Amino acid sequence: MLSLNQASEIVDAALGKARELGLRPLTVTVLDPGGHPIVVKREDDAGILRPQIAHAKAWGCLGTGHGGAAGARHATRDPAFFSALAAMSEGRVASSRGGVLVRDAEGALLGAVGVSGDRPENDETVAVAGVEKAGLVADAG
């Protein structure tokens, strides 16, 4: 499982990358393997739903066992399944880029990161950058 220090490093590095790229205000959430928040940061002027969306992206990765890019591809191919998944999870799953699983060098699951606020591909870019800056492996799918 991720420590508070590791989760904080991921979030701060992701937000730093976002500022470097000039992205819109973001929210970044890091969850433990059980789906519980470790760190959540919402930048000034980020939309009021961004924390829930970031959480849903990370939670969806944990729930399905793959990164948000894979989830987005699957949702496109089988929208009925993902509609059912959203209903079963009481709306807590967002199958979208910007959610990544966090693994150690051996592939063990440590948690997940969700980013929301810009285009999905940009959210994913900063999520991956944050995880890698912490010396861990990002599984975007």
Image: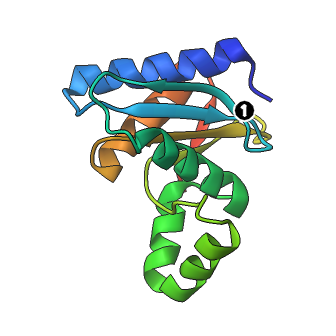
Quarter of the picture containing the N terminus is: top right
Can see residue 78? no
Count of picture labels = 1
Residue ID at (73%, 44%): 35
Q: Provide residue 77's location: percent of width, then percent of height.
A: 47, 84
Q: Where is residue 27, by image quadrant? A: top left
Image location (x, y in percent) of residue 40 = 55, 27
Residue wearing tag 1: 105
In the picture as drawn, the residue positioned furthest to the front comes out as 48
Where residue 13 sits, quadrant-wise, is top left
Q: For this view, does 132 lie left or right of residue 62?
A: left
Position of the C terminus, as image quadrant, is bottom right
Which kind of residue does numbered mark 1 sit on? Answer: Ala
Dot 1 falls on a residue whose secondary structure is loop
Q: Residue at x 71, y 59 (%)?
A: 63
Closer-to-camera residue (51/64): 51
Image coords of residue 12 (percent x, y): 47, 16
| Number of residues whose C-alpha sits closer than 10 Å to that of mark 1, classed few (under 14), some (14–19) or many (20 or more) | few
Q: Is residue 134 left or right of residue 63?
A: left
| Closer-to-camera residue (116/9) | 116
132 versus 117 height, above or below? above
Q: Position of residue 105 (x, y in %)?
A: 72, 32
